[in-house]
Amino acid sequence: MIQYIVRRLLQSIPTVVGASIVIFLFFTLTPGDFITARFGANPHITAERMAELRALYGFDAPLHERYLAWAGSLLRGDLGESYMYRQPVSDVMSTFLWNSFIIAIVVVLLQWIIASVVGIFAAIRQYSIYDSIVTLLVFIAMSLPSFFLGLLLLKWFAVDYKIFPLGGMKTTGVDYTGFAYLWDVLKHMSLPVTSLTLLGIGPLTRYFRTSMLEVIHQDYVRTARAKGLSERVVIFKHALRNALLPLITLFVLELPGLFAGAIITERIFNWPGIGKVTLDGLFQRDYPLMMGYTLIIAVLTILANILADILYGVADPRVRLK
């Protein structure tokens, strides 16, 4: 197992290098730069001054020199400096990344708990009224755009009924501590969590339903029923374990998403997470921030794939990791 993990980590190095090249070229060759985004609309700045600023930031250097400088910094653990925040990218990300992670971990837990219960019972009661209602609600949830659902929740629960705050992470001008602070944050994150949970629960419910349907029609499940075992034992002991195997990969691949943030939702609810910061960085052409953020998500995705293979082998002994 250790040899397998070490070999997979070594094999992932070329992938990381390739990803860094693609990420660098994608952002560097995108039209516009930070100088244009920041000073382009200023009528008092001259073309010569713009050229001086581009030289100051190193934008006039050849591509290969800029990539090698960036890659060299990465090897030293330096993701560069954000143009917008005038801080190291790692500091900016550590400030906002955990705000997104708090919401993401709650959303993932809610989605998997609700989707597993709803999906499994929909599979057990296939073609029933319950299954039809679940299928209808799932397709409605899957068809709703994130901005529409977010704005709808804001109008109902923040504007019309004033149950939850309009946005942000805490009440402005109030210095809560202890439980009062925790309660304030929970109220502010209620609407973003509800929006993201509803948006992601549809596909996951379909996965659970489909995976369970494939299993409960297998011969070994029929054999378990023929032995006189109760339906609860047949479903939750024999069928559910095998139905969860394909979902292991799906769950592990969601882990990078915990840090990725939800750009549109965080923007709508003004939640100070990495998604909102990333969108601001895109508008301002803050490429060091964007490249650092994208590279970290790429590395997390590669590690998640390795973890998925390992967990699949642990869950199913028939799978041998070589």
Image (spheres, rainbow, N blue to C red):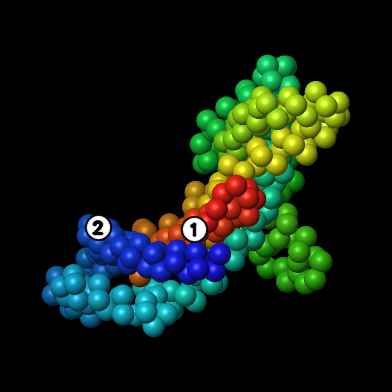
Q: Quadrant of the N terminus?
A: bottom right
Q: Which mark is residue 322?
A: 1
User: Judging from the image, what secondary structure is the residue with disc 1 in?
Assistant: loop
Image: 293 above or below 221: below
Q: Residue at x 86, y 26 (%)?
A: 228
- Could you classify mark 1 by the number of other residues whose Cα lies within 10 Å: few (under 14), some (14-19), or many (20 or more)? few
Q: Amino acid at mark 1?
A: Lys
User: Judging from the image, what secondary structure is the residue with disc 2 in?
Assistant: loop
**Residue at the extreme bottom:** 76
The quarter of the picture where residue 302 lies is bottom left
**What residue would you read off at disc 2?**
30
Q: Is residue 293 visible?
A: no
The quarter of the picture where residue 112 lies is top right
Q: Position of residue 262 (x, y in %)?
A: 52, 52
Lower sequence index among marks 1 and 2: 2
Q: Residue at x 82, y 35 (%)?
A: 233
Q: Is residue 258 left or right of residue 301?
A: right
Q: Amino acid at mark 2?
A: Thr
Q: Is residue 78 visible?
A: yes
Image: 187 above or below 2: above
Image: 121 above or below 25: above
1 and 2 marks in contact (CB < 8 Å):
no
